[in-house]
């Protein structure tokens, strides 16, 4: 190739680069102009208050950098959100969007025709989430919700000095957990701190054992009452729970466990001296420890995944509590906000602050603010099998009413763990009545 040919080739290459840069600038301007053309107000009722509301405010600020002409009016409602929404819907004036923590309520609203599908967000959700997360936000195959924020309910928290004193390591399997508990008990410390006065913590324990034993398929069948509570699978899980519920295994014995509320069970295990060595509960235990004890991360307390029970692909299945974002209207501004919330940049804003988990696979573990948070939140996005808290999917009369249904019956089982057959019959009777009544 002579110099003239080389010069022509170089000139052509430079021209292509110039054209490419011009096209990129044109596309960028077009994209910016398109975002600027989207305007309007999005009203949003959510359960997040205090620090969580502030964190979500930071997410909104990040959205406004891209969509400066959309105003998101977030109203922190708290745990009264279902009541507030029901009143607003009855009056014909629901908010544009809402954050709902009960997937059963989302299903109810979708079936009643109150929610708008968010199928326009499918491509971006597929890019950032494993297929299971789209399924979690779907009702009868139609996508209605984005699981924006998730709590990992499949964690075990342990007192580091107590484990060191007993000469044991954090258990990875149920068999190891049983051995560790016996050794810790022999060392003079009760192995478990149980919040028996808060019935939902007992359902969490049952659900994790059931999930890790039988996998998501059977878990979801039981959740939907397609498997009866008198089934042999439930019997096996209750036997495992009964092993934990022996009086000598629990801080304060049976009577003490029945009188202990959450978060006291969490903090009791990390006082000096500790009243127990382990707490089987969700990722939010860390916040309770830090706010109410002097225990330090890594040296005073730590966390590992809930022990696997049955080997196989579902051994690492994760139970979550999820905050589902739903829409009651459909406008360009709403669509833009929903799509943004499904992206990694949106999740990263909150994740770096802590107190936030996500199934977004494009959010790196390094974004979380400390090692323990990375250990508890990263498994959510890596898990191949993810399920909602079973109680949240069931009729409230059975799965979420203080002193009744599951909560009350598991407290009764804690008091007398030898009565497995009797409790199963009562659980089935209560479930049948709740599902029949829809309530």
Image (cartoon, rainbow, N blue to C red):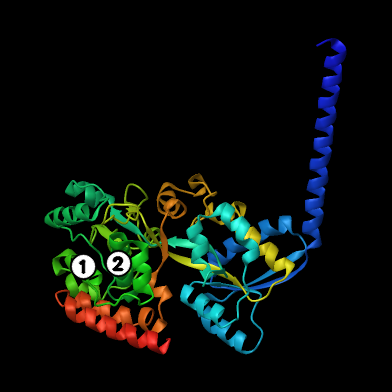
Q: Do we see residue 356 in this rendering?
A: no
Q: Nearer the viewer, residue 311 or 284?
A: 311
Residue 99 location (% of width, % of height): 56, 71
The first of marks 1 and 2 along the sequence is 2
* Quadrant of the image containing the N terminus: top right
Indicate left or right for 71 with 149 as reference.
right
- Mark 1 or mark 2: which is in front? 1
Res 134 label: none
| Mark 2 burial class by Cα count in 10 Å: few <14, some 14-19, many 20+ | some
Residue extending farthest to the top is: 2
Front residue of 218/346: it is 218
In this rendering, would 340 be left or right of 152? right
**Relative to 345, does residue 257 appear above or below in the rendering?**
below
Nearest the viewer among 411 and 432 is 432
Q: Is residue 51 above or below residue 124?
A: below
Residue 391 shows in the view? yes
The residue at which mark 2 appears reads as: 205
Q: Secondary structure at mark 1?
A: helix
Q: Quadrant of the C terminus?
A: bottom left
Residue at position x 80%, y 36% from top?
20
Determine which residue is flagged by label 1.
Answer: 236
């Amino acid at each position: 190739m002579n110099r003239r040919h080389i010069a022509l080739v170089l000139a052509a290459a430079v021209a292509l680069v110039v054209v490419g840069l011009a096209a990129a600038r044109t596309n960028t301007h077009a994209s910016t102009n398109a975002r600027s053309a989207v305007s309007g107000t999005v009203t949003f009722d959510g359960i997040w208050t205090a620090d969580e509301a502030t964190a979500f405010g930071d997410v909104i600020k990040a959205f406004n950098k891209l969509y400066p002409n959309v105003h998101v009016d977030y109203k922190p409602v708290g745990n009264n959100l279902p009541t507030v929404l029901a009143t607003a819907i009855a009056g014909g004036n629901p908010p544009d969007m809402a954050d709902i923590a009960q997937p059963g309520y989302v299903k109810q609203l979708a079936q009643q025709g109150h929610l708008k599908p968010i199928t326009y967000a499918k491509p971006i959700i597929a890019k950032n989430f494993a297929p299971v997360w789209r399924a979690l936000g779907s009702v009868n195959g139609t996508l209605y919700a984005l699981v924006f924020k998730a709590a990992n309910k499949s964690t075990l928290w342990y007192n580091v000095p107590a484990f060191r004193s007993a000469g044991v390591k954090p258990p990875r399997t149920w068999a190891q957990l049983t051995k560790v508990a016996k050794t810790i008990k022999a060392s003079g410390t009760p192995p478990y701190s149980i919040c028996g006065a808060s019935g939902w913590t007992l359902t969490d324990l049952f659900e994790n054992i059931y999930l890790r034993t039988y996998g998501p398929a059977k878990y979801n069948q039981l959740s939907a009452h397609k498997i009866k509570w008198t089934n042999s699978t439930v019997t096996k899980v209750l036997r495992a729970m009964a092993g934990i519920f022996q009086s000598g295994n629990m801080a304060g014995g049976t009577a003490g466990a029945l009188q202990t509320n959450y978060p006291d069970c969490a903090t009791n295990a990390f006082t000096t001296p500790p009243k127990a060595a382990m707490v089987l509960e969700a990722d939010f235990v860390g916040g309770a420890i830090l706010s109410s004890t002097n225990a330090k991360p890594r040296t005073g307390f730590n966390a590992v995944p809930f022990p696997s029970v049955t080997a196989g692909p579902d051994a690492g299945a994760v139970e979550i509590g999820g905050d589902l974002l739903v829409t009651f209207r459909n406008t360009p501004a709403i669509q833009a906000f929903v799509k943004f919330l499904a992206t990694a940049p949106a999740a990263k804003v909150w994740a770096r602050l802590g107190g936030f988990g996500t199934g977004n696979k494009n959010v790196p573990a390094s974004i979380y603010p400390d090692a323990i948070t990375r250990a508890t939140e990263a498994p959510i996005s890596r898990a191949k099998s993810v399920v909602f808290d079973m109680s949240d999917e069931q009729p409230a009369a059975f799965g979420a009413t203080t002193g009744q249904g599951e909560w009350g019956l598991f407290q009764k089982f804690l008091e007398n763990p030898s009565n497995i057959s009797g409790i199963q019959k009562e659980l089935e009777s209560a479930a049948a009545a709740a599902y029949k009544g829809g309530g």
